[in-house]
Amino acid sequence: MAISIKSANQIDKMRTAGKLASSVLEMVGDHVKTGITTEKIDQICHDFIVNDLDCIPAPLNYNGFPKSICTSVNNVVCHGIPSEKKLKKGDIINIDITVIKDGYHGDTSKMFIVGKPSVKAQKICNVARDSMMLGIDMVKPGIHLGEIGKVIGDYAHSKNCSVVRDYCGHGIGEVFHELPQVIHYDDGRINQSPILEPGMTFTIEPMINLGGYEVVTSRIDGWTVTTKDRSLSAQWEHTILVTETGHEILTLRTEETN
Ligand code: MF3
Ligand code: CO
Ligand code: CO
């Protein structure tokens, strides 16, 4: 299967889905405080997505995932399942939102820090965000997809952090996860990686660890991915469109525009 090129009409729908997904992250910020459970955050997002946005929360029942959003706290890398566990001071949490509107997906996540961050917590959140933005800055027609990963990996490594290898970004559209795979480090195959063309849509979503890159998946729930060495992990995600001249961030939030 080749990488799909979206038509102008499909791009309009991706733009709408992206904007709506970003609005969920804007809405939920005020709720992320000590004492709230991640299950309550899930419920607030679910109700907003379904009732206010008239969208479908894509994770719910996706390959059996039991909730509408992913909430990944501290050493959880990704795919954290909302639960009755309460947030406490100093926690860092990734909230990952994917909505479906009119058949098209918008996928985005950000880190929230609960209360006053430790130096380590602030660092890993910043390194993850800055690495994603450097990767996004690369996006334009004609480059190899692998160049994005190299920039992300080089930056994370320069800060003594590691890049998770077992999970990557992905093409997105009518399908939640489609080609291409967006690798967030240099796997030595940049020249064999696809060349970007206008109309491609994919996510960039590096997972960056304070310690080693190895991860483990929970044998209990089959979903929760944690760092093997229990070090902190952070992730940010945007859905990106390749344009004629560069790129457009389809999930940009108002707080990011200035
Ligand atoms: N939103 C995640 C991503 O960025 C995928 C979550 S799949 C789920 O690709 F099943 F865990 F929800
Ligand atoms: Co994604
Ligand atoms: Co996501």
Image: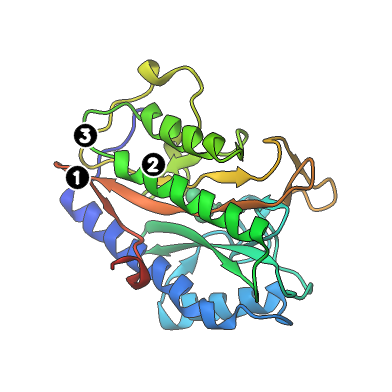
Res 183 seen here: no
| x 47%, y 75%: residue | 49
| x 28%, y 68%: residue | 258
Q: Secondary structure at mark 2?
A: helix
**First-in-chain label (3 vs 1):** 3
**First-in-chain label (3 vs 2):** 2
Q: Secondary structure at mark 1?
A: loop
Residue at image mark 3: 141
Q: Secondary structure at mark 3?
A: loop
Distance between mark 3 and mark 1 Cα atoms: 7 Å
Mark 1 is surrounded, within 10 Å at the Cα level, by few (under 14), some (14 to 19) or many (20 or more) other residues, namely some
User: Three-letter amino acid code at disc 2?
Assistant: Gly
Left or right of 56, for residue 173: left
| x 39%, y 34%: residue | 148
Residue at image mark 2: 135
x then y, percent, for residue 127: 52, 49
Distance between mark 3 and mark 2 Cα atoms: 14 Å
Point out the frontmost of discs 2 and 1: 2
Residue 243 is labelled as 1
Residue 129 higher or lower than 191, as above or below? below
Point out the frontmost of discs 3 and 2: 2
Mark 2 is surrounded, within 10 Å at the Cα level, by few (under 14), some (14 to 19) or many (20 or more) other residues, namely many
x then y, percent, for residue 201: 32, 45
Mark 3 is surrounded, within 10 Å at the Cα level, by few (under 14), some (14 to 19) or many (20 or more) other residues, namely some
